[in-house]
Structures are given as structure tokens and as C-alpha cells.
Amino acid sequence: MTGVASGLAEHHLHLAMEDFGHRVLIILSVVFSVRGDTVYLTMVTSTPYGAGSSASISCFRSSPDENVTLSFGRPLQIGLRGSTVQTSTTLPAGSTQSVNGQAVTWDLTSSNDATGLFYCEGSNRNLTTRVYSIIHSIHRRFEPHNGLVTKTINKGEDVTLMIDSVNSSTRPLWHRNNNRTAVRLHAYDGMYNITIPSGNISDGDLYATIENLLSVNDNHFSLIRLIVRGCTTGRWGPPSCEDVCDMCYNGGVCNDETGDCICPPGFSGPNCLTACGMHKFGWNCEFDCGSPPASCNGQFGLPDPYGNSCISGYMGTYCNESCPSGRFGAGCTQICRCQAGDEACDRFTGECTRSGCQDGWSGTSCQKSSTAVPTPSMTTVAGPTMAEVTITPGGSEDSTTVSTATNPTPMSLVSVVVPVVIVLVLLLILVILLIVLVKRIRDKKHAEVDGGSSMQGKFESSNDLSSLQTIDNPISIPMEDINSNPNGDVVPETTPAIRPESSVSQISTLDSSSPFAGLPLYPTKERELKKDPIPLKDFVAYVRQAVRGHQLRDEWTSFPGIEAICSCDVSQLPDNKMKNRYRNIPAYDHCRVILEHDKDDPNLGYINACYIKGYKKDKAYIATQGPNQATLHDFWKMVWQENVHIIVNGTNLVEDGKNKCAKYWPDMEKLETFGGISISLVKEETRGEYEVRTMIMSKIDDNKSAPRKIRQYHYTTWPDKDVPKDVTPVLRLIKEFSDATPEGAGPYLIHCSAGVGRTGAIIAIHALLQQAHAEKTLDIYNFVADMRDHRVSIVQTPVQYTFIHLALLEALFSGDTCVPSSSLKKRVAELKKKKKMAEEFEQLNMISPVPIAERCRSSMMESNHNKNRLPSTLVPESCRPFLMTPREDGMEYNYINAAFVD
């Protein structure tokens, strides 16, 4: 074997320029999977130049399947002379196998028997993946046009299969391998291309062309595989195909079974936006086909529905031609979009080396576009159009109404008039808003506003419809291909909830002072997405797969958004509005904590706090906002009334210059009174990432009630608008307050600033750990969905939803890893017995999160590849040091493969 060099130990593969003599080797990928998943395999061939001894096939194993066992064979032997295809399960006699790191290579013999269909198979995690390859003889009479042996289409699309003559004096005969039987396609005899209209799954097959019925004995056939996705364009999940594919960039193809992107060789990541760089490939960009460049001139096979292609930067029948100017990517199929012109485009990555992207394009390789959306026919009014705009910054008590009128001139150019009108209206709105806000600041300096201000708008119009004119001019509206949801304690916009048809309850009216008054009212619906609990034995594989793709983000998107799905009228009573730290996070009426109050109390005992169900326990938690100055007394009144003994605080008092929570506890050894309750701080301890305060609470003028001990667990290092880098301190905090809970205690009181983001994550982890220990299953999706029925937008971002999964993974499969220094020697001795240390290390590798390339942008840049000892060792942007010293050549480079460690 000469095709794979020993340098693979450093993850460098060198495929030699072998001359095959009798055969041309082409790769074709087909994946069989039992769960919509796949074992991560890549097949690579040697370069077919046509003179030599033998061909070779290499199969590469990517993480997490780097140790999977591989096998090679032949499921059938192509035979077109008769009607039945003969079968064979062994490789040609004389073939030899060699193993080098994560690659297994078979050198095939030069005999005529070494042609047809071959496979590499890997099995892991109850999955089996086969990657097929096709070997053509160098003496073939025909070959696929441009060497493309796979053709992928979407269901319902027309397709044309084309071949070229290599050394034939006669016209071709077409066959297809239908259910292991060669079927003659007489209608296409003598044709160099065949067209299949409205392709269906049944059309997906292996198509063969021969010179005559006898030439197959000489292995002069040519093969093309047609791959038909089970769904139409942009859809996945056959047979219904109701799910929408994510954007797959740089030539990636949506897997119709899973919705994931199959990335071309040279790209990786959930959306194929991560460029591996020159000569690099693999599911995690961990392999390098080396230098000289000719070592990369082979076919690279990937799972269906992708098929096969050249590596990024090359094209042609033998993948030995560099991309022309203005093209990049696998097979040079991608168009460069650089502002400085085609010469500034890197042919391997598409990055613009001397400038940014062209107008209307963005992204690392300038593949994200702003899309022009044509509008349907529009109707204009020839008479005057009156418009009333009511601007309400903050609450509805501060509003200004402005009336405008348009001239009675019919519009003739919608694309010009509409933007002008929009700009004028927006300028008018901004001026009015500024005036009103100045008035608010002057008149209400005493009011505390901790959250982001909100603005309500009411637009009414009346039209004279006596004269109508219809025009059909398109309007270009910039639209981003990929939307990203903001993080933080208040989400101004989220994806609307899916609203199926089955109704559970109906909200009929809202108080006129409610911020939602006047808006369409939707009934509370049963959730459309139903998910079964996950058995613990499957949880590791489930999380690794879900984190790698977009499954968790899609689950989070299906939850109700920030709109209220239940009545919240009490929160909008005039005296209660100031008790809401954030105006778009009210407390639902059906589950709010009701403070004891007099019958004639107009506020109805309101506090912005909601009961949350726990594991088989109603009202196990109270999710509430961080107190403001208007609610300090009510906060402690609630703690006493609900018999709270444990308070968990996930926010600091001030973050990014904004007030997040009022200080509701006294200083050490000081006594403070809140209404009729006195609080004293008797102990304060630091645990690194969080602090523990012990307080004594007493009810003044109540000799019958004994003082109570309150413990507050204050997590001080949870970053605003993000999640902690490490789940371990969060798990340690949860374990500590669970162990400290006295018997007979009331609900846990959990809060951050808004009481939805960090609060929801802590509650979910705590409750789901109880379920896991009791039932050996986890029902994360339905638990979070139930929480959304009790508090607006709880578990606020997809990042927090992912964090819950990762925290549960570590808690359940690594256990408590904190060891007191006094016990370290004993612990090490225990680990050395019966290979316990090796087992624990293997467990650590198993549950370690999959690195996301998008968070390691600098490590992935081509200019930094030579600074990474191993291509798979990446440094996240959030924890890498930035070099400040200029180099001797005057250039500034801030990258080094190093990371800060807490």
C-alpha cells in the first residue's frame, strides 16, 4: 500500500499519485441508518491517471466514531449480460488491507474482477452506515459527464443523466439496476443523455451504460447513481415532509431524513459555514490530504443525499484542476462574492482576502444573501388617505396621537413612494417619542425603571375607496436567510408559537388597560410537538446528536413566545404596573402568588411571582423577578407567607450598567425591617462562583411565630445574556441548596432579574434530576413546555435550553467530582484499582460537549492552520488570549492556540 503515508498520526494524510493501469476509481456514498443518524465515515479514492498496478479505497472515521470497527465488501457484482445480477460478498482475491490511525485502506488487485460496486461499513451506537464506491475500468467505453457519478435531485424535479464517449465506436445501451436485477432501457438506446421527468424515489437507482451486451464481460461499463431526496426542495421528514430544512451553505445538501446539512468536503458545521481550509476534510475538518496538492486529486464520498465530489478548491473528471477565478468550494461550484473582485477570493474557503463582501452578501464566505421578495398586486387609492398613529412609550397612560393625510395623487411607482412615506412617518414617530420621553423623565423622576422601555403603537386608517387603481410593481425587501434570537432577560421578539387547531381554553376579554388590549386574542392550545421521555441509557447519544445539529433550537422555537398565552389582567391594574420590573413579563392570573390582602384592596394582593410545578409536586417553586424598590416589602411578605426557606438568586444587582435587582438583604450583623418583617444577616460564605448567606427572619409584633432561618444562594458569575462556560458550579449550587432544605419547607424561591431566563434553567435542572433518579428517564421538552404555561418566556433562549441538557448530562453521568484536599490521596488510590481511572477518563470523553466550530472562528481561519498542532484542537473565541505584539515583518497577528482556564 502506497496511498496513505504514516504521517496520519499527526492527522496528515498523503494520497500518492498512483497510476492504476486498468481501472478508474470513483466514490459513491449511500447511507443506511436505523434512527436517522449516521456513523461518521468519509471515503477517499486515489487519483485515476490510467497506468499502474492497482487502485485503493480509504475509509476515514471521524469523531465520535474514531474507534468504530470497519469492514469492506461487495454487496453485488454488476452483470448486464443476463437479467440477474450475480452476488459476491468478498473483495477481489489478492486485495490487501492496512490501518493507519483513523484510516483503513484497501489496495485492490489489477484484475478484471476489481470492478463494480464496493462498500465500507461501520457500526456504532446501534447504527450501521455503508458507504459505497464504484470502480470503473480504465478501458471503459463511456464515462459520466464531467466525471460526476452521482446526481442528486429533490422529489418532483426533472433530471438529465449524461455520459461522454471515451473510446467507443458505437452508441451506448442503457440499463438500470432495479432491485438487484439489470433492466434494459430500450427507449434510450443510442442516446448520450436520458431525461426523467418529475423524479420520484422509485427513480433513484444505479444506471449503467455499455457498448453492447457482450462488452460487460470486459468490464467496459459506466455507472451513474441517481439520488432522489424523499421531499421537495427545502423540506425534510418523509412522507409528510412538513419540516423545513435549515440553510445549507457552500454547496451543502439537506438530509431528507434528519434535516441536518451534509457538508461538502472542505466544510463543516451545522450550516456548512465553517471552512476547513486548504486540503482539509472530514466531518470535523480533522484530516489533511497533504502536500503536494496532487495528493488531494481523488473523489471524496459523503452520505446520501450528497453523493460525491472533489475536495474544496478542485474540479474536473479527476479532481486535478484548480478552481478558476471567481469560483471556490467542492467541485468549484460556488460563486465568489468579494467586493474587491474575483482575485480576492480564496478558492478553498471563499473568504475575501483583501476586502469585504459585495453589497447584499455577508458571512465568512459571503454566501448569506439579502433576498428580494416580490409583492403581489397592490391597490392604491386616488382619494385622500387619513392615518392616525398613537404612540405609547411605556404604559398606556402616556400617549400622543398624530393624524396625517396623503395627497390624492395615485401612486405610479410603488418602489419609490412607499419607502419615502415610511421614512417620513418614522421620522415623525421619533420626534414625538423624544418629546414624550423627555416629559416622562421630567414628570416621573421618582419612578424606578429597571427594564428596557416598551412602546405600544396603534395605527388606524380610513380611506375613500371611490376610485381604485391596481398596479403590479415588485418591492425589494431585505430579508436575512438565517435569524438569530437575542439573549438576555427580556426578549423583544421571538418566533411565534405553533398554534394547532385543538383548543383547550379561551380568553374572551382583557382589561382595557392591559398592554395586550386591542390585539388579537388566541386560545390556549395543546402543543403540536409531542415528545416522549428519553431513557437515561440513550441520553448521552441523544445530547451529542442534538447539540451537533439544530434539534434543540427547533424544540425551543416551538414553545410559546413572549406573548401572553393566558390572562394577566391583575398585573395591569394601575397600581400594579409599577410592580412589574419588565412590562412585557407579567404574572399570569391563574398561577400567580396571591399575597394576603383585605377584601377592598384594589391591588388584589399582586406580586410578580408565579408558582411552578416540580417533579410530582404542585407549587414546588416560585419563579419571580428581582425585587425593585416598589416590591421589597411584598417580597419578604411572600417569603414569610409561603414558608420559603431557600432563596436562589441568579443575578447581580447591576449588570452592564443596568439595575437588575434591588438589594433586599441587610449587611452583615445589621437588622433591616421590611413592612412587618425584620431580617438580619448572620453568616456570609463564598463558594467561588456563588455566595451563601444565612439570614434570620422574624415577624414583628407576632410572639406566636418563631424566627425562621433563611438561606440565600447567590450565583454571582452567571454572565448577562449568556450561560456559564462550566456547568459544574451550577450543579454544585443546586446540590447544596437541595441538601440544605429543611423538612416541611415551602417552595423554593428562584429569581434572577426578570425571573424567566436563568430562573427557568435552575428550576428545570433541579426538577429533572429528581425525575431522572426516580424514573430513569428525562422529559425535558415537556417539562419546559409546562413551565411556559405558568410563566411568560421562562427558559428564555435556545442557549439556556441547551445548557439544561448539558448540565443534566454531566450531573447524571459524571457524578460529584469535587474531592476535599484531605481525601485526594485516598481518592487517587481508589481510582488506580481495577482501572477505575481509565474508566472515569473514558466517561469524561463520552460526556464532553462536542466543540462547535462557529465558536472557534480564529482557529478555523486558513492563516492560522499552521499554528494548530492538531487540526481537531480548537480554541473558543471566548477564552483565547489575544497577542498584542507586532511581528518583525510589521504584520499584526493576535492568534495563538492557547486558552484561559479558570
Image: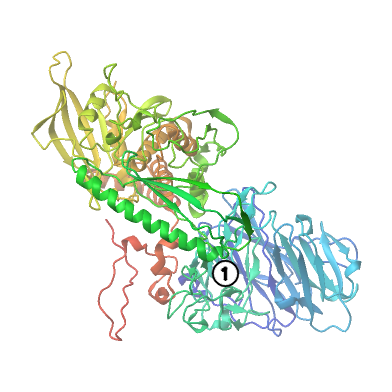
In the displayed structure, would residue 826 be above or below residue 289?
above
Q: Is residue 795 visible?
A: yes
The quarter of the picture where the N terminus appears is bottom right
In the displayed structure, would residue 154 be above or below residue 23?
above
Residue annotated with mark 1: 265
Q: Residue at x 71, y 67 (%)?
A: 151
Q: Residue at x 23, y 23 (%)?
A: 640
Give coordinates of residue 260: x percent, y percent. 57, 56
Q: Nearer the viewer, residue 818 or 386?
A: 386
Please indicate whether residue 834 sits to the left or right of residue 631 in the image: right
Q: Nearer the viewer, residue 825 or 852?
A: 852
Q: Nearer the viewer, residue 287 or 418?
A: 418
Please indicate whether residue 501 sits to the left or right of residue 593 in the image: right
Identity, as a three-letter code, of the amino acid under mark 1: Pro
Q: Is residue 122 visible?
A: no
| SS at mark 1 in the image | loop
- In this view, the residue farthest toward the left is 669
**Which corner quadrant of the image does residue 254 belong to?**
bottom right
Q: Nearer the viewer, residue 769 or 433?
A: 433
